[in-house]
Amino acid sequence: MKKSLLLALPFAALFVLAAANAPRDERVLLESEKVSYEWVRDWAKLPEGMKFGNTHGCVVVDSKGRVYMNTDTENAVIVFESDGKFVKSWGKELAGGLHGMCLVKEGEAEFLYLTHTGRHEVLKSTLDGEILWTIPWPEQAKVCENAGQYAPTSVAVAADGTIYVADGYGRSYIHQYDRERKYVRTFGGPGTELGQLRTPHGIWIDASGKEPVLLVADRENQRVQSFSLDGKPLGIVVTDVRRPCHMHQTGDRTVIADLAGRITVLDRKLAVLGQLGDNPDPAKRAQNGVPREQWKDGEFLSPHCAHFAANGDVYVLDWNSLGRITKLKRLK
């Protein structure tokens, strides 16, 4: 990248890409002053004849390093090894609407908690796809007249088993349940003031401080808000984002999927370390129908979810009708 271009960019938005159309034998790097990742070309290897279909969900990584991602097809959950080798897929009955997903360890076992916008419910499953229970629409909250007004987009689970559900495509509330799935409270709601939300698309329990807090990707308000675990608004903690969809934390970093064509990497204090993979063409950002011939290595389209592996690598799921998932290898 030319020196003049680097000087023209503010630090918070700084990113460096090896030419996106670089020869196949050249590395594609996404870098700022403090972070560096390598774009792993052609990472996911599907079986012959299998296609992703629309990717409008989430991605998580289990303790063995296996990667779980959502599609809108009958392969609602596709599982890969960390090297991109296909393992399995499942979820025929969940086709069309599986959207939010988090992985929860309970004792020695791991489970998936999922939201389904079309079925208007939250589900818990084994890693092999056995559905263990569901939580229906929150009739007790009295903010929806029927299940059709409820379209949950994200779920998070606290250390004590408390469950939080974001109605991101519905009425913009957060619903809280205890570990036995009994309704506790509802907070948030539509608006722009502190504590109000416009499309709370993704949620995450931040346990890095003295007290755990709930982080909310308040997408259409272009910010991340913080709430206590009993629903009290604490503050706006991140604003330098472009339609944030989801977030995930590892020991020293947080990654945010910015729907408008990039990811944002934060430090332990939620200060911006770098904004990477920024698509230079605004017409390709937050667009579901960008054709494959217009994709470029090193440029995201519509990041919908991003998730760390234990070693700091990042997996990014783009919202795209053809399906796209990218692996970034952490270098710094």
Image: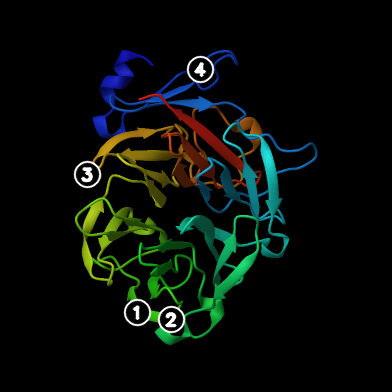
Q: Which mark is residue 254?
A: none
Q: Whole-percent x and y of residue 77? A: 64, 53
- Label 4 crowd (10 A; few <14 / some 14-19 / many >=20): some
Residue to which mark 4 is pinned? 27
- The residue that disc 3 covers is 269
| Label whose residue precedes the other's in the sequence (3 or 2) | 2
Mark 2 to mark 1 CA distance (whole Å): 10 Å
Within 10 Å of the Cα at label 2, are there few (<14), some (14-19), or many (20+) other Cα atoms? few
- Residue 327 in view here: yes
Between 55 and 184, the residue placed more toward the observer is 184
Residue that mark 2 sits on? 182
Q: Position of residue 31 (x, y in %)?
A: 37, 25
Using the numbered discs, state the Cα–Cα distance from disc 4 to disc 1 in whole angstroms: 49 Å
User: Is label 1 in contact with label 3 (beta carbons under 8 Å)?
Assistant: no
Question: Which is nearer the N-term, disc 1 or disc 3?
Answer: 1
Q: Quadrant of the C terminus?
A: top left
Q: Position of residue 246 (x, y in %)?
A: 42, 52
Question: Label 1, on which residue?
Answer: 185
